[in-house]
Amino acid sequence: MYVDTRPVQTPLGDGVAGIDIGEVRIAAVYDGQGVHLHSGRLIRARNHYANKHQAKLDARIARKKNGRPPGQRSSKRLRRLQRARRTLRDRIKRQNRDQLRKQARQVVSTLHESRVQTIAVGDLGDIRNRIDYGPRA
């Protein structure tokens, strides 16, 4: 174990900022003077690609599974397709996690430059529970 000898960054001011978290825009930050928007388009585009590619793999996997009697070992092609699907999902998950960390770092550095000390983040946990979308939705 090593002792952390990095100096702690002192706050530049005592401002307050509010953050609205979303999907299209990862964070909309209002610090009293202006609004800073941080885009989440790259993550959405990556998920769109992954879902599209996974649908193709799922269709091929379904064709391989249909002709096999229960209890029989699966084919090498089926195992390769399942591994490709798993690898795709893991890669996209790692890339999204990396992008979220980069966005968080960018938000924090923006707030630091704006001399913000306190951040207020809304709780959006049960917002969908109060809205009646109707039976079709």
Image (cartoon, helix red, strand yellow):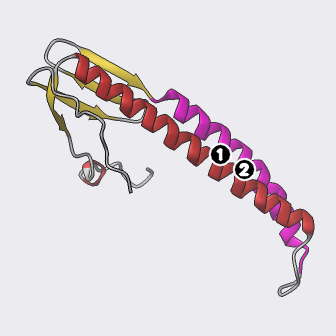
Q: Quadrant of residue 42?
A: top right
Q: Hey, what amino acid is under mark 1?
A: Asn
Q: Residues within 10 Å of mark 2 (few under 14, many from 20)?
A: few
Q: Would you name the residue on which mark 2 appears?
A: 55
Q: Hey, what amino acid is under mark 2?
A: Ala
What type of secondary structure mainly makes up the magenta span?
Answer: helix
Q: Quadrant of residue 79?
A: bottom right
Q: Position of residue 87 (x, y in %)?
A: 71, 53
**Foreground of the two, 107 or 112:** 112
Q: Residue furthest top?
A: 33
For this view, does 20 lie left or right of residue 68?
left
Q: Would you name the residue on which mark 1 appears?
A: 51
Residue at x-position 57% and y-position 48%: 93
For this view, does 44 lie left or right of residue 102?
right
Q: Position of residue 60 (x, y in %)?
A: 84, 56
Q: Quadrant of residue 82?
A: bottom right
The residue segment tinted magenta is: 40-68
Helix, strand or loop at mark 2: helix
Q: Position of residue 71 (x, y in %)?
A: 83, 87
Contact between marks 2 and 1 (CB within 8 A): the answer is: yes
Question: How many callouts does the rendering have?
Answer: 2
